[in-house]
């Protein structure tokens, strides 16, 4: 894996680690279980540029999480190759970090220690350095006043911001987000859209971000990839060149979200059609 340099307070956040380029070439994933064989993904070929924010949208169960898991190195692809900066992904590594729908924080640690936990592998850092890096990342997500709070004392949005700070603290080069705002209320999500845009403009972290929310996709993305029903393939690409920061309720964001939604709906309808045909043809 590519070595990631941890952030040093005092330097600009953009200097934490050079963002990485990701490439997928003919990638497929088939899960084989004792009961079934599931073609979950692909073939997918994709180039994500350094610092690019790519959103994946697709029908439920189409293979979005599978794609993120493969880039994270949690699972190997069945076919094809995944490279980060030209180096084949052969397993998880500190250069890639995943953020999930439910922030997996430790209830027995306070907020600061949860964030510092992300730095546990950086054994060359002293405890004081780890603490300073964690504090800096809490500031980045506007949680500096909650360093000593415990997880049960946080709102859902604050938990997700803590998870974001923990993910960013070790200066990964790629951020993989699997519906990170999916369980939050609408108002909290809208605040986080502004924060995530600010964070992205400061860190330029190469990001793959899964969502079902088309307005969220239009608000955040450089590119939105609409995926087909399972096995996920790239059905349509929307390049988004609206100026940033984008307002969630901007008319141009709404118009684009409408187009993405139409594309998704057509995929879901087509998929139902296929299933129906298959059902009719069944024994
Ligand atoms: N470990 C696994 N073993 C067997 N099948 C799996 C495994 N993980 C995922 N699948 C199957 O692969 C397909 C794609 O799953 P995946 O979780 O990637 O979809 P998704 O697009 O993320 O769905 P959602 O939008 O509901 O989160 C599904 O049919 C799922 O049942
Ligand atoms: Mg999923």
Image (cartoon, rainbow, N blue to C red):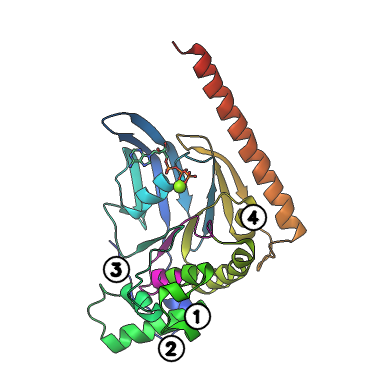
Where residue 243 appears, x then y in whole percent? 68, 64
Q: Which of marks 3 and 1 is nearer the N terminus?
A: 3
Q: Residue furthest right?
A: 251
User: In this rendering, which labeled residue sits more in front, label 1 or label 2?
Assistant: 1
Q: Kindly identify which residue carries mark 4.
A: 218
Q: Kindly identify which residue carries mark 2.
A: 10
Position of 9 compared to 4: left or right? right
Total marks drawn? 4
Q: Quadrant of the C terminus?
A: top left
Q: Quadrant of ligand 1?
A: top left
In the structure shown, which secondary structural element does the residue marked by tag 2 occupy? loop
Where residue 5 appears, x then y in whole percent? 33, 75
Q: Can residue 182 be found in the magenta stretch?
A: yes
Local crowd at mark 4 within 10 Å, few (<14), some, or many (≥20)?
Answer: many
Contact between marks 1 and 4 (CB within 8 A): the answer is no
User: In this rendering, which labeled residue sits more in front, label 4 or label 3?
Assistant: 4
Q: Which mark is drawn over residue 3? A: 3
Q: Kindly identify which residue carries mark 1.
A: 143
Where residue 261 appears, x then y in whole percent? 66, 44
Q: Earlier in the sequence, mark 2 or mark 4?
A: 2
Q: Is residue 283 visible?
A: yes
Q: Earlier in the sequence, mark 3 or mark 2?
A: 3
The magenta stretch is 164-183
Q: In the picture shown, does residue 265 fall above or below 101?
A: above
Q: Quadrant of residue 185?
A: bottom right
Q: How far apart are marks 1 and 4 (CA)?
A: 27 Å
In the structure shown, which secondary structural element does the residue marked by tag 1 occupy? loop
Q: Distance between the residues labelled 3 and 1?
A: 28 Å
Q: Earlier in the sequence, mark 1 or mark 2?
A: 2
Local crowd at mark 1 within 10 Å, few (<14), some, or many (≥20)?
Answer: many
């Amino acid at each position: 894996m590519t070595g990631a340099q941890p952030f040093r307070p005092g330097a600009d956040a953009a200097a934490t680690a050079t963002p990485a380029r990701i490439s997928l070439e003919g990638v497929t994933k088939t899960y084989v279980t004792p009961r079934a064989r599931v073609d979950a993904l692909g073939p997918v070929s994709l180039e994500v540029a350094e610092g690019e924010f790519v959103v994946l949208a697709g029908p439920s169960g189409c293979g979005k999480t599978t794609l993120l898991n493969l880039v994270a190195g949690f699972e190997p692809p069945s076919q094809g190759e995944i490279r980060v900066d030209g180096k084949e992904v052969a397993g998880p590594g500190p250069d890639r970090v995943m953020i999930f729908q439910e922030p997996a924080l430790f209830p027995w640690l306070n907020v600061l220690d949860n964030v510092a936990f992300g730095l546990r592998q950086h054994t060359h850092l002293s405890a004081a350095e780890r603490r300073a890096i964690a504090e800096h990342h809490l500031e980045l997500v506007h949680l500096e006043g909650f360093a000593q709070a415990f997880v049960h004392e946080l709102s859902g949005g604050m938990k997700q911001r803590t998870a974001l700070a923990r993910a960013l603290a070790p200066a990964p080069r790629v951020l993989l987000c699997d519906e990170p705002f999916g369980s939050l209320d609408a108002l909290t999500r809208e605040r986080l859209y502004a924060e995530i845009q600010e964070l992205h403009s400061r860190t330029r972290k190469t990001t793959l971000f899964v969502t079902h929310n088309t307005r969220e996709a239009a608000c955040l993305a450089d590119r939105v990839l609409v995926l087909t029903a399972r096995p996920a393939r790239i059905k349509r690409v929307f390049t988004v060149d609206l100026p940033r920061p984008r307002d969630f309720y901007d008319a141009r964001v709404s118009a684009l979200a409408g187009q993405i939604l139409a594309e998704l709906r057509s995929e879901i309808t087509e998929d139902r059609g296929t299933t129906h045909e298959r059902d009719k043809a069944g024994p």
